[in-house]
Amino acid sequence: MYLDWSILNVPALGIHSRVVWSVLVVLLSAIAFSQWRSYRRLSHFKGPFWAQFTNLWMYHVISTKTQYMDLYEAIKKYGDLARVGPNSLITGDVEMLHRMNGARSPYTRAPIYAANTLIPHENNTFSFVDEAKHTQRRAQIATGYTGKDTDMLEARVDHQLSELMNLIRTKYISRNQDLRQLDLARTAGYFTMDTITDVAFSSPWGFLTKDEDLGDWFSMVEHRIVIVYKMSSIPWLFDAVRMPWVAKMIAKLENPSTGVAKLISMASRIVGDRFESDDAGQIRDMMGSFIRRGLTQGEAVSEGILQVIAASDTTATAIRSTLLYIITNPHVYRKLQAEIDSTRVVPGPIISDAQSKTLPYLQAVIREGVRILPPTASTFAKVVPKDGDTVNGVFIPGGTEIGISIIAVLRNKRVFGEDVEIFRPERWITDDEETFKTMEKSLNMIWGHGKYQCLGKDLAWMELNKIYFERSLADISGQLLKHFDFTLVNPRDPWKAMNTGLWLQKHMYVKATLRE
């Protein structure tokens, strides 16, 4: 048997050329067969046409910076298990998500989680793909996040709130013709960065006191995050970038005084100083808890960096988004201010996390804020066990990756009503206990579930509970909505926001005035 080269219209080819053509034909045939097999194994799931054959569809939606809505639209059009890649499905079904993430679930993390390795050869809670190692590390650090193993967790949050109020009062109060624009997007990031570094290291890094982007951290995030998510959507490109020699080459290109390199340097120095001292684990902050629970120096640095990145970004997003919806809904603004004005802070001057939970409309506003625009829209893909799974009578082959569309979860009309696209806090004020529990079950998916639930959930809620209400310390008697009025500088273009999985929000300029 031989190849008939005439069909390729390449007459009189030499032996070397024929070898090259043979190799090309074999390679192309192998690729075509692989793509066909990939298409066939999930052909019973519907999705965008190109997503059935290539990951370039996902690359495209990330490039458009509207990934969160594209995945939501795919589920609305194709159903609760929509195909968004050759080996990828997306779901907005809460029961399916509980099935995937439960404590005893056989589902595992997708390989993409390894991209969250922040320093070479040192995994963290969010980068472990190995289930046993993830479970062990999670058990070691959990008490540090909950506050059970730390002192003054709430007091540290209160202190950073006082710094935030002080910054607004001393630098950004507009009077008459004197307009002083406050970028709430950037300032919210400063607040959450200083809060998490205070809670984690007993040493806030001073974004608020200096009122500047130290180490160009936020600028770096705005420029790099799109690139990272694009690369992660193409498996072979993701694998190539993770090769040791490539990673080292990229690291050498980093400016050591800015961005992630600066963050790694600062965390390494702080943790290194702890380990060099005689009482490395005696300080009762998060890092002290990690050390007491047996983390090595490298492990502690890795977890510390993860804390700063994850906790600061998502909470800042929730603050920005909810404030925008409050400011642009006068009815909500007035009603929330009325509840705040009628509340006597006990013992004062800063409302406690416990007392804030007794204010029904404040709680409704916070819940609705994170529902309408959740802090992250990453898919957090999990892998179907090797023998496959059958859901609602439909077989899902083993090895398939299934991600979450959190927007689809939180805009489910069967759960939240017909007006899911509207910011309406009143939906959370209901006497129907079952309705509330059903909505709450869906809302809690913003923090994950079961063995993958976000460890920083309680700290994030505490910051949200306080920031819309809080008084500052000493002679500063201000609080965001009790003593300040905020109006958008440009209502037609209130901010710049885009989503590639994480939110990028900037230029949210407001005019802050003192309330009479």
Image (cartoon, helix red, strand yellow):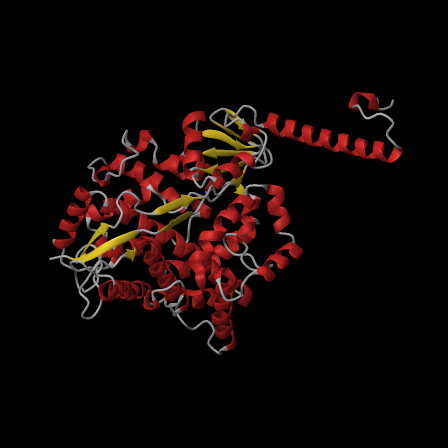
376 left or right, relative to 244: left
Question: How many numbered discs?
Answer: 0
Q: Residue furthest bottom?
A: 278
Provide residue 449's location: percent of width, then percent of height.
42, 44
Residue 308 visible to an observer of this rendering: no
Observer-nearest of 239 and 216? 216
Q: Residue at x 60, y 42 (%)?
A: 235
Q: Residue at x 39, y 70 (%)?
A: 203
Provide residue 358's location: percent of width, then percent of height.
20, 51
Provide residue 99's location: percent of width, then percent of height.
46, 37
Give the quarter of the figure containing the C terminus. Answer: bottom left
31 left or right, relative to 334: right
Provide residue 355's location: percent of width, then percent of height.
21, 56
Observer-nearest of 60 and 188? 60
Give the quarter of the figure containing the N terminus. Answer: top right
Q: Is 37 above or below relative to 318?
A: above
456 left or right, relative to 484: right
Q: Residue at x 53, y 39 (%)?
A: 59
Residue 203 visible to an observer of this rendering: yes
Q: Is 249 above or below relative to 237?
A: below
Q: Is 257 above or below relative to 340?
A: below
Q: In the picture, residue 418 is in which quadrant?
A: top left
Observer-nearest of 306 and 290? 306
Q: Residue at x 50, y 60 (%)?
A: 260
Observer-nearest of 410 and 355? 410
